[in-house]
Image (spheres, helix red, strand yellow):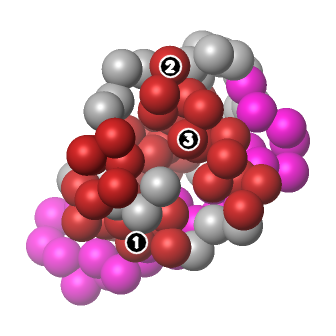
Amino acid sequence: MYYTAPSDSSFEEMKSVCTSVWGRYKDSPGGYMDEKINRIKDIQNISDNFMFMFAMFDMENQAEVVSKLTQETKQALLERMIAGGNDNSYLNQIGL
């Protein structure tokens, strides 16, 4: 399941939310925000790209991403997180 692409709507939502969260780093030196956004701006909804975008964040920012997702996209993420071997403790810490 981890490597299965979600619905296009969930993928686009994840991409939009991730871009928004990376946007908070616009004042970081060295183009950090641009580097991260450039890695996802043209990414397609195939294989584990949905999870790739989410995995780019640390736990605090993963929780921020989760807080901005619709229930449908949270469910798609939860299913893939479980399939990827994440335990309930971690899932609870990030709001899943």
Q: Nearer the viewer, residue 12 or 23?
A: 12
Residue 27: % across, % down: 24, 84
Residue tagged 2: 83
Q: Relative to residue 56, is residue 33 depicted above or below?
A: below
Q: Nearer the viewer, residue 79 or 37?
A: 79
Position of the N terminus, as image quadrant, is top right
Q: Earlier in the sequence, mark 2 or mark 3?
A: 3
**Circle nearer the viewer, 2 or 1:** 2
- In this image, 28 relative to 56: left or right? left
The CA distance from mark 1 to mark 3 is 15 Å
Q: Amino acid at mark 2?
A: Ala
Q: Amino acid at mark 1?
A: Glu
Q: Is residue 58 magenta?
A: no
Q: Residues within 10 Å of mark 3 (few under 14, many from 20)?
A: some
Q: Earlier in the sequence, mark 2 or mark 1?
A: 1
Residue tagged 1: 64
Q: What secondary structure characterizes most of the magenta part?
A: helix
- In this image, 30 relative to 76: left or right? left
Residue that protrudes farthest toward the right in the picture: 8
Residue tagged 3: 78
The magenta-colored residue range is: 5-32
